[in-house]
Image (spheres, rainbow, N blue to C red):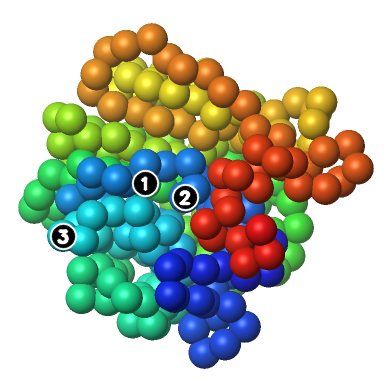
């Protein structure tokens, strides 16, 4: 868990607008591009972290829509957005994205989607999460196929979709993407330490059909210090980098 989070002059940590910053979301938000974005959609926004990270990169005229099924998360996201410099350009909504009426196309869509395929998964997350948050994070609440169906419906013809999934689910994710007219533009292999197997993949998808770019990132070195690559990727958001 990161200790602090900054966005330009906006800092959210350990105060009235406290924001929990997970490593996976931090990597995803740092890796995703939004330099030319005009319309951003954050699916399963949680506390609004990814929306705020992308708005930091986006042009001054960009607008973002953030949606989550968890009412308490939406309340926290609204408060974090209110504290930010982009409050007038971010809309936070409560609802189920699979049946939500999306009236426009988005040129950047981002999601840190549900990972877990059941409540018996070996993770401490189940010991600490509320029932509402469990429903939002379980794959049974929003499957990969359902997510990619939404993306297919909402993504502009030249738009880009970013997400992360466990490395073990790579064949499933890539198949679901192809079935919903999405091509893999790039894939980031994320490992906890140098030399270890990746535990997570970052995906960049779009309509354009071109050779996939593969890259990798180790979070810590063998001395358990953050790697230079990780520091470089996330330096705009970590207070102590």
**CA distance for labels 3 and 1:** 18 Å
In the image, 17: left or right of 69?
right
Locate residue 98 relative to residue 26 in the image: left or right. Answer: left
Report helix, strand or loop for mark 3.
loop
Q: Do the residues labelled 3 and 1 touch (CB within 8 Å)?
A: no
Decide which of 227, 42 is in the foreground and name it.
227
Badge 1 density bin: few <14, some 14–19, many ≥20, Cα 10 Å? many
Please say if the residues under marks 1 and 2 sit with CB atoms less than 8 Å apart: yes
Q: Where residue 17 sits in the image (x, y, percent)?
A: 49, 83
Q: Which label sits on residue 110?
A: 1
- What is the quadrant of residue 221 in the picture? top right
Separation (CA) of disc 3 from disc 2 = 19 Å
Q: Which residue lies furthest to the right in this view?
A: 223
Identified at 68% across, 69% down, the residue is 3
Residue 29 shows which numbered tag?
A: 2
Q: Give the residue displayed 31% in from the left and 46% down from the top.
A: 34
Mark in front: 1 vs 2: 2
Give the image location of residue 185, x and y in percent. 38, 22
According to the image, label 3 marks what residue?
61
Sequence-wise, the earlier of marks 1 and 2 is 2
Image quadrant of residue 223? top right
Residue 41 image point, x, y percent: 27, 52
Could you say which is closer to the camera, residue 21 or residue 113?
21
User: The residue tagged with tag 1: helix, strand or loop?
Assistant: strand
């Amino acid at each position: 868990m990161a200790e602090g989070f900054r966005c330009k002059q906006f800092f959210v940590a350990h105060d009235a607008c406290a924001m929990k910053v997970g490593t996976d979301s931090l990597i995803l938000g740092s890796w995703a591009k939004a330099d030319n974005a005009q319309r951003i959609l954050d699916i399963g926004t949680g506390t609004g972290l990814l929306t705020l990270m992308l708005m930091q990169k986006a042009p001054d005229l960009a607008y973002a829509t953030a949606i989550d099924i968890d009412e308490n998360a939406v309340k926290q996201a609204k408060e974090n957005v209110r504290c930010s410099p982009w409050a007038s350009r971010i809309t936070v909504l409560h609802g189920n994205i699979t049946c939500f009426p999306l009236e426009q196309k988005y040129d950047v869509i981002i999601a840190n989607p549900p990972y877990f395929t059941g409540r018996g998964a070996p993770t401490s997350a189940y010991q600490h999460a509320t029932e509402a948050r469990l429903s939002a994070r379980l794959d049974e609440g929003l499957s990969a196929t359902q997510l990619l169906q939404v993306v297919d419906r909402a993504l502009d013809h030249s738009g880009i979709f970013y997400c992360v999934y466990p490395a073990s689910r790579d064949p499933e994710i890539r198949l679901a993407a192809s079935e919903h007219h999405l091509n893999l533009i790039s894939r980031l292999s994320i490992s906890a330490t140098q030399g270890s197997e990746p535990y997570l993949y970052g995906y960049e998808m779009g309509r354009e059909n071109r050779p996939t770019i593969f890259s990798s990132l180790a979070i810590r070195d063998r001395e358990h210090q953050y790697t230079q690559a990780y520091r470089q990727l996330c330096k705009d958001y970590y207070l102590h980098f």
